[in-house]
Amino acid sequence: MIATAKPDLVTVNIDGKEIAVPKGTNVIEAARLVNVDVPHYCYHPKLTIVGNCRMCLIEMGMPAVDPATKAPIMDPATGKQKINWIPRPQIGCGTNVSPGLHVRTTTPMVKDAREGVMEFLLINHPLDCPICDQAGECKLQEQATGYGRGYSRFIEDKNVKPKRTQLGPRVTLDDERCILCSRCIRFSKEIAKDDVLGFVDRGSYSTLTCFPGKKLENNYSLNTVDICPVGALTSTDFRFKMRVWFLKQTNAIDTESSVGANTVVWSREGTIYRITPRRNDEVNDTWMADSGRVLFKAVQAPDRLSAVKINGTDSAFDIAINAAAELFKANAGAVAVVGSGRSTVEEQFLTKQLATALKASTHLVSRVGEGDKLLVSADRNPNVRGALVTGLISTLPGVKLVDLGAQIDAGKVKVVVTVGEDLAAAGLNAGQLAKISLIVLGTHAKSMDGGAKVVIPTLTAFEKSGTFVNQQFRIQKFLKAVPPMAGATDDLIVLAKLVGAAGGATIPTEVNALWKTIAAAVPALATTTFANLPETGQLLDATPFSALPFVEGETLHYKPAQPVVAAANA
Amino acid sequence: MFDFYFEIPLVIRLFLQGLAVIMVIFPIAGACSMAERKVAAWIQDRPGPNRAVVPWVAWIPFLGTFLQRLGIFHVMADGGKMLFKEDSLPGHVNKFYFVLAPIVAMIPALTTVVVVPFGAYLDAAGKIIPVGLAPLDVGILAVFAVSSLGVYSMILAGWASNSKYPFLGSVRASAQLISYELSMALSVLPVFLWVNAPGMEATMGFGRVVEFQSQPGFLGGMWFGFLMPLSAFIFFVALFAETNRQPFDTVESESDLVGSFHTEYGAFKWGLFFVAEYSHMIVGSGVFMLLFGGGWNPLPWVPLADLVGWLAQITPLASHPLFVGVLSISIFLGKVLAMIFLFMWVRWTLPRFRYDQVMKIGWQRLLPLSIANLLFYAIAIAFIQK
Amino acid sequence: MAVITVERKPLTFLERTYLPQIAGGLKTTLKHLVAPKKTLEYPEQRPAIPTGYRGVPTLVMDPNGREKCVSCQLCEFVCPPKAIRITPGEIPADQPDRAHVEKGPKAFDIDMLRCIYCGLCQEVCPEEAIFLQNQFSMSGYSREEMVNHKDRLYELGGTLPDAHFKWDKKKAAEEHGNAH
């Protein structure tokens, strides 16, 4: 990426620590840089600042100067310039740094202010943490341990507000828990561009609600749940499923499109409970689409393949590999490999090796949808660029497998290996499928599985580690969140065995070891290792592919280099 | 009235007598293991085993409950369990000697009974005739000779088990038995010096010893336990060591030797070792009572003949040989059981000696003491009987 | 630190023979032989359970026979041997007296082979729903039998008096409270 111009730096003093921060940074962010936590509810780094929760109150001051001469006034006691402290606390989120700004966050006044804010916030709070899904990741809980009283002085009746309101198909609202921070309102308005939420009534009766006749049903509605600092907005899908403190967090990548939104997979004992976005300011900020949050349900789907099959009868892995080897031998030169844009870079590399060993033609299945200009791009394959980088394909895949169909019709291809792709759905007709011996690697049952010679169950993206190259040519890694399903084999092992069956060299199947082979074989990835890949990903050189007509339109943090070709779906 | 009995050939008669003795000793030995548990429990303020009961006995009011609370059915339960348990034979043992060892343990335990008289009756002439299987003249020598063989069973068991703790245990057993046998033998010599008075036919049998404790007069009616207290004490201590009873049961000290020579044993073979041990205790107690406790005489200075005489004044039936026999056997058995209780009482009172202490007591204390004791009585008896 | 030298008295002759000590010991044990028994004959005679005893953990109902547990899973979290396993669930709206609680356990299992009777679950419970009561003897023929499921936990727990009626108050506030 083009290096941004170095911003002007401003030196500020926070709790006695001097730090230079870019101009325009607010005090909360500046304090974060010196590891000073300024508690806040309404402030969110990716949303506009409203300053309505008043939790981030801090003490502020500027070095004193003589009004007449502008000469610094020195403090005789310390020998340093005197600081003129503002007698009232200020909000940190709404205050941008200015040269020489002094901030104190630990003084009694700040503590008093925070305790006062907490007491007011908790006055009408139902305190139903035992049944609240937010418990464990609730800002109110966290700050209450630091600034709460431990008991309530409020002897009057608490306000009663609507509970268990369905704001939309995926979001449940408990208004009693709401602290009126308005993050959700701002998100809907500013990010999702779907202005449906607002406050009605005044004072302590203020209530969050949808505008009349509207629902919070856009594809980004669950981000309001993520940013809600309390348990007011909760996910209907995740409601009462599991407490968050039991869940293991695994970094992952959203596979629904080539945006490659960074995610966290929350799982417990091999069961995934939810997926939330992970902040990556270069890709998805702190957001992700709702449609990407339900992908984990595929892991335990009833149509998951769990048994190796040869000609439709259960078999064993080694026997299946031998059967594939025999097919390869008997049909040497007449094998085609259908790779997948959903495979990881590693799998695509091995698919390429398989095709090389078999001297087979390679094909990729295209998936084009409509981009929503935010975090779902037009290319619904997460890793087409990985196939380009690894050399599996050299041009973008056509809409249908026309070439392959023609080759089958011509009798040039008798065996097809498909890595996770449904050939019938991808464009081959029944007659073409009947002519070939099919070797299927896949996670879920597909229409043509019944006629397949060999079916080997493999893993979903949640059960393995790997990398994807997103639309920005950013290679991003994801890690295994849950153990593989019994009966399924890691794609890398299956592919490496098939390469062996095709007479190719032995290739390591453990990700870190495999990356040494990949780095040696693929010049673009020569300096990359899986272990050292940063959490935010690494940009690859896109220039060799700049001439290709990629289908993606503009999305968050992505502008297409080429004008969008009028794709077939248009 | 029992003449028919004496018309049976001698061999069969002796066989029947032997069988009768075994039939008594064996259950008593078994019951002792039960009594041991019960005494242990009482001393430890527990009720002890009191659950097993035979249904139709339980139906008897009071008595059934009493017997159940006493735990006597546990003898049957334990015995039955031992008998019907799977008799496993470890793979690493020397099978022949391993099986032989418990048998060897039983042989001396039951053989020594042969020479020990356990009662008496009055013949037509009013003379006390001891009752025993084979009242040999060698008496005490036979007991010592045969009972020492018992240690071979332990050595066999320990060696055949082919395992280190049993082996160590058996080595300890042989050393301990040899150490205390000396003191034991020396401690009884004064008794036999005394009973083999000049002018009498020499004997090592027990009949004469009891006879000497049944004489009239202060000194005559005095049991040897009072006459030779040190001898009695040494014999008593050595008896504990010989029977491997607490506080001398270093052979079986489970804290350092697991189960010692019977570690590898189970089921009935294991049970036989214990029956043998209790049989040793019974015979040992019997010998002690004969030598130092007046035998079948009911009380010091009250010989059996006097008691029978008094009873005969009440009913003439009392002088019937059968009655006298049963009476004397009961008295003797009662004394033996009291002695066994003493064994148990000591066991649940004293901790075990360390092995070096056992050796030290045996060689450095008891042996010199018994030699001194022998010298003292030898000189004294020489003076008195001159 | 001052050092106090204690003179170790040499043993007298009698003491060195052990005999007086042995006699003393025999006397002591003889006393115990006839002393009243101190043990209980367990299945028939039961020990008196002191207050605060920590027996088998159970779930209790409130005096109106309603489930108190809201499946917050704090006990599951705090349980050191991980004996507790809860599947949370939503209370359906067709239970008018409980629907306002919203959440309740769908399944609640305590593996008594794992439980160490530490009582942390009782201590942590915000709803006073789990109590270690007097039951101390748990046995079964299989591992599965040793897992107390929800039904069994309520059967063991029964009903305990409630000082708070927290959720009833909440419902009353919901119906008659400071509504707008």
Image (cartoon, rainbow, N blue to C red):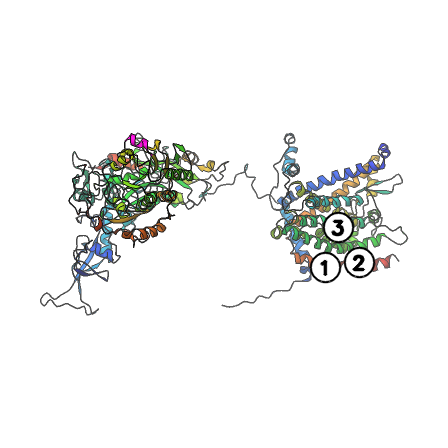
Contact? badges 1 and 3 (CB < 8 Å):
no
Look at the image and give the residue range highlighted in magenta: A429-436
Q: Report, in whole angstroms, how far the alpha carbon at label 1 lies from the one at label 3.
A: 18 Å
Query: Disc 1 residue type?
Result: Trp
Q: Position of residue A249 (x, y in %)?
A: 32, 46
- The residue where tag 2 is placed is B374
- The residue where tag 3 is placed is B148
Q: How many marks?
A: 3
Q: Please state which of residues A392 and C150 is positioned toward the viewer in this rendering.
A: A392
Q: Residue A241 in magenta?
A: no
Element class at badge 3: helix
Q: Please state which of residues A460 and B258 is positioned toward the viewer in this rendering.
A: A460
Q: Report, in whole angstroms, how far the alpha carbon at label 1 lies from the one at label 2.
A: 16 Å
Where B299 falls versus C167 (above or below)?
Answer: below
Query: Disc 2 residue type?
Result: Leu
Disc ID at residue B363: 1
| Residue C127: quarter of image | top left
Q: Please state which of residues B170 and B91 is positioned toward the viewer in this rendering.
A: B91
Q: Report, in whole angstroms, how far the alpha carbon at label 2 lies from the one at label 3.
A: 22 Å
Q: Label 2: chain?
A: B
Sequence-wise first label, 2 or 3 = 3
Which secondary structure class fits the magenta region best?
helix
Quarter containing the N terminus of chain B: top right
